[in-house]
Amino acid sequence: MMVKIRRVEKTLAEVFSAGEVPGFIHACIGQEATPAAVCSHLKPSDYITTSHRGHGHALAKGVDLKSFMAELFGKRDGLYGCNS
């Protein structure tokens, strides 16, 4: 899970640097162990909340990667389905 989080975050950092992500991101590179460890002990029905640098927690909890990326890019098929 730590490797997955790192790979996703590195990709996000690259596309953000290229100006392809609307808004701003706060990558959790270097902090992958915390969400991986915490979420490995949660049941599917458990909730988790986070704030700053929360991508790793969402990924470790099992959020769908396609929906996750769509959300960050402001697409309609993102996690909340209310984007343009």
Image: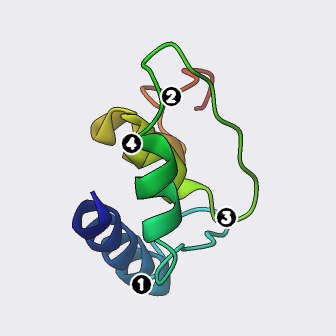
Q: Between tags 1 and 4, which lies in front?
A: 4
> Residue drawn 31% across and 41% down?
65
- Give the SS element for disc 4: loop
Seen in the image, is 20 located left or right of residue 8? right
Q: Position of residue 69 (x, y in %)?
A: 39, 48
Q: Label 2 sits on what residue type?
A: Leu
Q: Label 4 sits on what residue type?
A: Ser
The residue labelled by disc 1 is 18
Packing grade of label 4 (10 A; few <14, some 14-19, many >=20) is: few
Q: Where residue 23 is drawn, which disc sits there?
A: 3
Q: Where is residue 13 in the image (x, y as percent from the top left)?
A: 43, 80
Q: Between tags 3 and 4, which lies in front?
A: 4
Q: Label 3 sits on what residue type?
A: Gly
Measure the C-alpha gap from mark 3 to mark 2. 16 Å
Q: Between tags 3 and 2, which lies in front?
A: 2
> Residue drawn 64% across and 65% down?
53
- Give the SS element for disc 2: loop
Q: Where residue 40 is drawn, which disc sits there?
A: 4
Q: Where residue 79 is drawn, which disc sits there?
A: 2
Does residue 46 lie above or below 39 as drawn?
Answer: above
**Does the residue at mark 3 contact the one at mark 2 (Cβ under 8 Å)?**
no
> Residue drawn 44% across and 21% down?
43
Q: Residue furthest right?
A: 51
Seen in the image, is 57 located left or right of residue 44? right
> Residue drawn 47% across and 37% down?
75
**Does the residue at mark 1 contact the one at mark 3 (Cβ under 8 Å)?**
no
Q: Which of marks 1 and 3 is nearer the N terminus?
A: 1
